[in-house]
Structures are given as C-alpha cells and as structure tokens.
Amino acid sequence: MMIDLPDADLDPRRKRLIFRSDHRGTKEMDLLLGSFARKHVAAMDDDLVDRFEVLLEMSDPDLYNWITGQEPTPPEWQGPLMEMLRAHRYR
C-alpha cells in the first residue's frame, strides 16, 4: 500500500530515511532507494522502518546486486523488505 504524503506530514525519522535513501552516493541507488522510500516509508510499520534503517547501512554495490538479483541475498536480508524492493525495481 502506498501513501503519497508530503514530507511535511512525516515524522522526523521517516523524513531522514527518505533523505538518506535519496543521497546514497551512486546515482543508481539514489534513484532506486529514493523512489522506493518516497513511495513506501510513510506506510511502513515501525518494524519495517527499523529494518529499512539498518538496510541503509549496507554498501551500495551489495544492495544493488541483491535487489537486482546479480548476487544472492544473504539469508538475514531475505524477507518482506527485500521483496518490496525487488518489486519496486520492476515498476
């Protein structure tokens, strides 16, 4: 479910996650994670937000390879969040 709220309506933590997602360092990941965060962060429950926050600590090359399927996703990152990211990639 997507909620398209202006950033002003989000709590500070979610605003920071969107900013961090948009400013990764590589253009590909800025586009992929930034658009994902803008579409999904507002609707995420706290557990998923926690998970996404930790995921953003991973390196861009690793994340890109896991999301695009170029490398297997480590077991600890398999689950609903990675499925959402992969589905978002194909939109």
Image: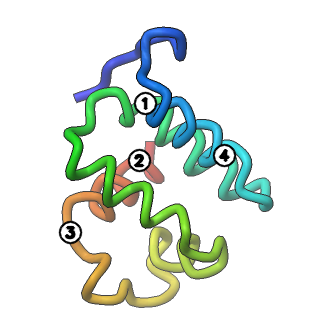
Q: Secondary structure at mark 1?
A: helix
Q: Which residue is mark 2?
A: 88
Q: Which residue is mark 1?
A: 39
Residues under numbered marks 1 and 2 in contact, where contact means CB atoms less than 8 Å apart: yes
At x 25%, y 51%, the residue is: 48
Q: Residues within 10 Å of mark 3 (few under 14, many from 20)?
A: few
Q: Which residue is mark 4?
A: 31
Amino acid under disc 1: Lys
Residues under numbered marks 4 and 2 in contact, where contact means CB atoms less than 8 Å apart: no
Report x, y in % for residue 38. 50, 31
Q: Residue 86's quadrant in the figure?
A: bottom left
User: Which comes sooner in the sequence, label 3 or label 2?
Assistant: 3
Q: CA distance from mark 1 to mark 4?
A: 12 Å
At x 32%, y 19%, the residue is: 3
User: Which comes sooner in the sequence, label 4 or label 2?
Assistant: 4
Q: Residues within 10 Å of mark 4 (few under 14, many from 20)?
A: some
Q: Which residue is mark 3?
A: 79
Amino acid under disc 4: Leu
Report x, y in % for residue 15. 53, 30
Quadrant into which the N terminus falls: top left
